[in-house]
Amino acid sequence: LVGGIAAYLWGSIGSEGGNKLTRGKAETILWHKYGGVPETVTVQYEQDKASPGYVYYFLGDEYRDALKELERRGFITINRLAEQGAYLEFTKQADPYILPAEHAIQKKILMGKPKRIEVTGITAIGEQTGQTKAQVEFTVYYDATPFGELLDKIVASGQLAGIPALFVLYDDGWRVQ
């Protein structure tokens, strides 16, 4: 019996009238909302007074090896490592991975782009309201950039799993809240 209930919940959640939230429908809605949203990190920086052209990035000591590897691959040039960061500059090779940031003292680095979203579970909530709400859990699979591969453990793994989303049924269909 439990398997039958789980299969029902996995297959479709909906209201009377056939407007069911299926796995495929949920994945399509999630992709439209999140599929074009890249994973980025914004880092603060300040100019290096001792070496014009280089800036100090606050990254944390745990990224020293990753920074050295990015330099070896030709994406950055390190002037010197410092406590909690590095004085560096981005090379032309890094240009495709540097996005506009909100403030002049920031750089936004592209870590990865979503390539697929997979729904891993659908659970009805609020059954007394005709099942007009559903909790959906999903996984985003990424194509990591060189920066994401070395600086972002989640993107480097290729996926971010267990993301919750609340779906609500409106007159015109299901929406993510």
Image (spheres, helix red, strand yellow):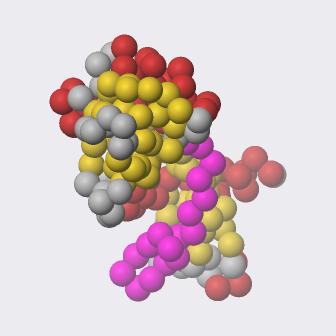
The answer to which of 175 and 90 lies nearer the viewer is 90
User: In the displayed image of the protein, which residue is found farthest to the left?
Assistant: 92
Q: Is residue 30 above or below residue 56?
A: below
Nearer to us in this view, 74 or 46: 46
Picture coordinates of residue 57, whole percent (x, y)? 44, 42
Residue under the point 32% across and 27% down: 76
Residue 136 belongs to magenta span = no
Q: Check the image and report above or below for 68 versus 4.
A: above
Q: Count up the numbered dots.
A: 0
Main SS, magenta residues: strand
Q: Is residue 131 visible?
A: yes
* Outermost residue to the front: 50
Residue 66 sits above or below residue 25 on the image: above
Residue at 54% across, 25% down: 64
Quarter holding residue 34: bottom left
Say if 30 sits above or below 143 in the image: below
List x then y, in percent, for residue 13. Answer: 57, 65
Is residue 161 left or right of 43 when viewed as pictured?
A: right
Q: Which residues are magenta?
A: 156-177
Residue 174 painted magenta: yes
In this rendering, would 155 be left or right of 75? right
| Residue at 41%, 85% in the rendered image | 171
Residue 8, horizontal then vertical, whole percent: 64, 56
Is 175 placed left or right of 4 in the picture?
left
Residue name at image x 30 percent, y 60 percent: 104
Residue with the most extreme right position: 1
Query: In front here: 110 or 68?
Result: 68
Q: Quadrant of residue 105?
A: bottom left
Q: Residue furthest top?
A: 72
Task: Tell me if 59 is positioned left or right of 71 in this view.
Answer: right
The quarter of the displayed image where residue 142 is located: top left
